Amino acid sequence: MLDFHSHLLYGIDDGVKDRAQSLEILAEYKAAGIDHVVFTPHLYNPYVTTAVKDIRAHFADLHQAVLELGVETYLGAELFVRHQELKTIPVLGRYALCEFDVYSEPLGFCDLIDRTLMQGMGNEIVIAHVERYTWLEPGGQRAQEMKSRGYLFQVNAESVADDVSSRARKWLDSGMVDLIASDNHGRTSGSAQVLVRAYEKFPRIAAKMKEIEDGIR
Ligand SMILES: [Fe+2]
């Protein structure tokens, strides 16, 4: 199984702080059957300080260390989209994972997002934790426009694994959700199981995730 969105690369953003914790959590992932994990540190998020200069070195180190555990890791990023420079590391070389301000929609935002693709940073857009944005409703015109542009929608495992939040419920009922991921910022105990339970609960979405996973093999 695959975790598409995580902050488990130590010492980079507001996720895992140190190497030992990364190793501990990834060992737990392996035990739960999650053996492909994408690290997606925040980029350009105005509320998070990201040590961009350390990303590649920490990834090289951790990638090697957890191979021995039987976990394959990949480097991506979570790009905060607003009117600024748009540079990212596409997830699995293909997917530009995008997040936004929770309360206000960026002006002309579909065109803004598409600029990411035009700059060669991925082939597909994935909207991170779509249940979070107060300005985006699954039945609304904005969501329809995004769907028609082929964007994919991700919900967080935490929002759906046990008690489904009311906002996540709306998105699930609309049938628009394509991906589930942990967005794990370093919660240790049981975090892998949350993702597993979410996949078990939503087999249709888990099957889509499997297609993504098969694409990397
Ligand atoms: Fe995230």
Image (cartoon, rainbow, N blue to C red):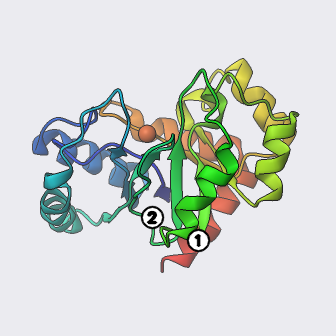
- The quadrant holding residue 58 is bottom left
Is label 2's Cβ within 8 Å of ligand 1? no
Amino acid on which the number 2 mark rests in the picture: Pro
Compared with 77, 138 (above or below) is: above
Which residue occupies the foreground of this view, 104 or 28? 104
Percent across and percent down for residue 41 are 33, 47
Query: Where does label 1 land, which residue?
Result: 123
Residue beneath disc 2: 90
Q: Position of residue 178 (x, y in %)?
A: 70, 52
Badge 1 amino acid: Asn
Q: Residue 84: horizontal and vertical position, in percent?
A: 44, 45
Q: Earlier in the sequence, mark 2 or mark 1?
A: 2
Residue closest to the eye, 29 or 108:
108
Residue 138 appears left or right of 114: right
Local SS, label 1 = loop
Query: What is the quadrant of residue 118 in the picture?
Result: bottom right
- Other residues around mark 2 within 10 Å, as few (<14) / some (14–19) / many (≥20): many
Q: Is residue 27 above or below residue 165?
A: below
Q: CA distance from mark 2 to mark 1?
A: 8 Å
Please name the residue shown 81% across and 35% down the image: 138
Residue 37 at x, y = what percent? 38, 57
Residue at x-position 61% and y-position 27%: 132
Q: Residue at x 80, y 39 (%)?
A: 142
CB within 8 Å, label 2 to label 1: yes
Q: Residues within 10 Å of mark 1 (few under 14, many from 20)?
A: some
